[in-house]
Amino acid sequence: MRGLYPRPMPRLSARLMEWFGVDDAWERPRPAIGRQDVVLAAGVEAVGLLTLELVRSAGGFEHTDAPVWTQWLAVSTGALLLLGRRRWPLVVASLAALHMFVAGVTMPQVMGQMSLQIVYFVALLSGVAWARDRRAMLIVVGVIVLFMFAWIGWQFAVGSAAQEWLDDEQGADQEGLFPRIPAAVGFTLVINALYFGGAIAGGGFSWRAARQRARLEEQTTTIAAQAGRLREQAVVDERLRIARDLHDVVAHGVSAMGIQAGAARRVLDRDPDAARAALANVEEASRQAVTQMRRLLGTLREGVGERAQDDGASRTTDAGVGDLPALVAEVSGHGGLTVRLDVVETQPDAASRLPRGIALAVYRTVQEALANVRRHSTADTASVVVRVDEAAAYAEVEVVDNGRPRHGTSGSGLGQLGIRERAATHGGQVDIGPRVTGGYRVRVRYPLGGAA
């Protein structure tokens, strides 16, 4: 039943604890005492001693009976506390509160000097800003504030603060809206509330700013690490792509040269012209294979993302759907294999507008599939169908043959693995395997545009 009612708003104390980072696991690093701490403490001490003597020379300490050396000691020890304000923030804040109390009781006019007031303010602010244990910080700061306001209340209740105020104002008529004693108490409370509240708020803002900087640094480090991993992954992906291309090139070229060499051997004695033609085909196939291998190896030497001076040397290939007729013509008629090519375009010239990566993947799929047919199948016919439908946002390639697996010609499976990896790169779907009606089919469908 509780789920039917809205959740109560977080209490003010919970919000304050969250703002001060009480439950935050992050700890602000503690720097060692450095040059800036020494400069700050020395500067505050020098200014404090100078103003102390200026006030004394102007007759401001006529009600102070403490020896001069104790006044100097009070100013100097207060300034020295600032040395450890970042290293031991809560200890320094506690010592500063004790210093304020002792100096206020023994020599209140010295404690009220601007230099010591700055010391107490900075010490309390640093306690909030640099404390690593945020819960302990709240306890220490809360005790300090309660103690200071209790001391102020004691001064007005049973001390001499009210009497001093009356002595100063004796004989003067009331001019404001409030009576003298309530006005004195209220004024003192407001000043101290602003003083301590400002120090605590300033420390909280300082801690939160440091926390935000730490988060930004963590995010920057994470982004840099992710960028490094992405670069490494890009290198690996590029190497795998080149390895697949190299496999396709070598497999296709060697397969073509083997078939042509076998044909030349069979007709060498009875038909020299046919043998020469077959050997010429072997020469041409080897030249193409070597050229593409050089391009691939050149890309490996250049590294991922680098461009060679010669554009042709830097690219593995620019093959696409437009190069399929030449590939089919090269394969068809050799070894008794007849290959038919059909390019089905729902929109005119849709195949020519395929993205370069998908066009190359289609070409490599057909090349690998036909190479497998020649090496591992008894097929005498094969069909290659490329379908491109921009409206339905897909491109599909299908290679089907009518043969059976040839015994003793099992391959390594890298060719089919390359087909699957190429398809996965572009979000494609792969269907490879024997058909129920006989033969073997390789079909890959690639999504176009937003369908990916």
Image (cartoon, helix red, strand yellow):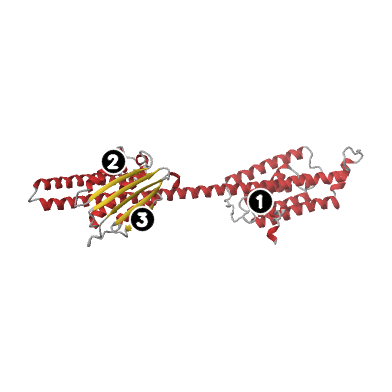
Q: Nearer the viewer, mark 3 or mark 1?
A: 3
Residue contact at pointers 3 and 2, CB within 8 angstroms: no
Residue contact at pointers 3 and 1, CB within 8 angstroms: no
Q: Which residue is mark 3?
A: 431
C-alpha distance separating marks 3 and 1: 58 Å
Lateral position of residue 251 relative to residue 205, left or right: left
Q: Which residue is mark 2?
A: 313
C-alpha distance separating marks 3 and 2: 34 Å
- SS at circle 1: helix
- Sequence-wise, which precedes: disc 3 or disc 1? 1
- Sequence-wise, which precedes: disc 3 or disc 2? 2
Residue 152 appears at what percent x and percent y?
A: 80, 50
Q: Identity of the amino acid at label 1?
A: Trp
Q: Residue at x 12, y 47 (%)?
A: 274
Q: Is residue 217 visible?
A: yes
Q: Nearer the viewer, residue 310 or 38?
A: 310
Q: Residue at x 69, y 47 (%)?
A: 201
Q: Which residue is mark 1?
A: 19
Q: Nearer the viewer, mark 1 or mark 2?
A: 2
Lateral position of residue 219 relative to residue 230, left or right: right
Q: Identity of the amino acid at label 2?
A: Ala
Decide: few, some or many residues near mark 2? Use Cα within 10 Å; few <14, some 14-19, many ≥20. some
Residue 181, which numbered label?
none
Q: Is residue 98 visible?
A: no
Q: Nearer the viewer, residue 277 or 144?
A: 277
The mark total stands at: 3
Q: Residue at x 73, y 53 (%)?
A: 144
Q: Identity of the amino acid at label 3?
A: Asp
